[in-house]
Amino acid sequence: MSTPFLLEIACNSAASALAAAQGGADRVELFENLEQGGTTPSYGTLAVTRDKVKLPLFVLIRPRPGDFFYDTLERDLMLRDIEMCRRLGCDGVVIGALDADGNIDLPLCRELVATAGPLGLTFHRAFDAARDLPAALEDVVTLGCQRILSSGGAASALDGSAMLSHLVAQAGTRVQMMAGAGLNAQNIATVAQQSGCRQLHASAKAVRTSAMRFQNPALIGLENDWSQTDAQRVAELRQALQNAA
């Protein structure tokens, strides 16, 4: 049965993307370094995911953790990564940049958009770090992005649902607001209803336990376990949205 809600899963690996597809996701955002907010995935991760996952595939273009104020070297990295996404047949890219005063860096973002060409465009959570969210929304509209990933400038989309509702009203049909940050099967329907967002973004992650029988106890700080999207958690998110519909 169809639902009015679109579920995008944030995937930190090819294995996570496969789990997202298995669990019923509508779209994948692919990246690496989940614990640091996400960075652009490797060529291998991109290529294998594109080969094996038939869902719409959007790729995070972010050259490093930290803020969203980028220098010329980082600009060159982002432009090359977008070119790679086009060559590999990805469906879209997830971009964003700010100037030092917390405004959308329109000159840089225009370059990113131009390089993306026919690819779909999501503006990532650099939006939430902007000085003035309503003004930032107008700037993103001028760039031609199809959607903005946002928590309403709050720590979680649940906390920011009131602001998201205002942004949804401001955006109208010009750009889609996609709620993300802290979503799970227990709160995703509430966020969808309170914010008015029809696109929802969640990682659906779970800890994967290492299968290593030998682990050196002296290697303090080297974690053997890792986080990965869980197909069952994706299915629970999908069911929660189905129930809300």
Image: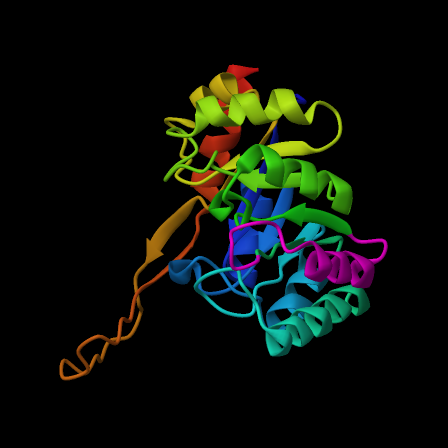
Where is 18 relative to 78, above or below? above
Looking at the image, can residue 181 be seen?
A: yes
Q: Residue at x 45, y 22 (%)?
A: 162
Which quadrant of the rendered structure holds the C terminus? top right
The answer to if 124 sits in the magenta stretch is no
| Left or right: residue 235 compared with residue 50 | left
Q: Position of residue 189 (x, y in %)?
A: 47, 22
Which quadrant of the structure image shows residue 110? bottom right
| Left or right: residue 147 compared with residue 184 | right
Which quadrant of the structure image shows residue 49? bottom right
Colouring scheme, one of rainbow, by chain, secondary structure, one colour: rainbow
**Residue farthest to the left?**
218
Where is 217 relative to 117, above or below? below
| Left or right: residue 179 compared with residue 136 | left
**Residue farthest to the right?**
118
Q: Residue at x 56, y 20 (%)?
A: 196
Looking at the rendering, the stretch of residues picked out in magenta corresponds to 99-119
Where is 204 relative to 194, above or below? below
Q: Position of residue 99 (x, y in %)?
A: 57, 58
Which quadrant of the rendered structure holds the N terminus? top right
The answer to if 103 sits in the magenta stretch is yes
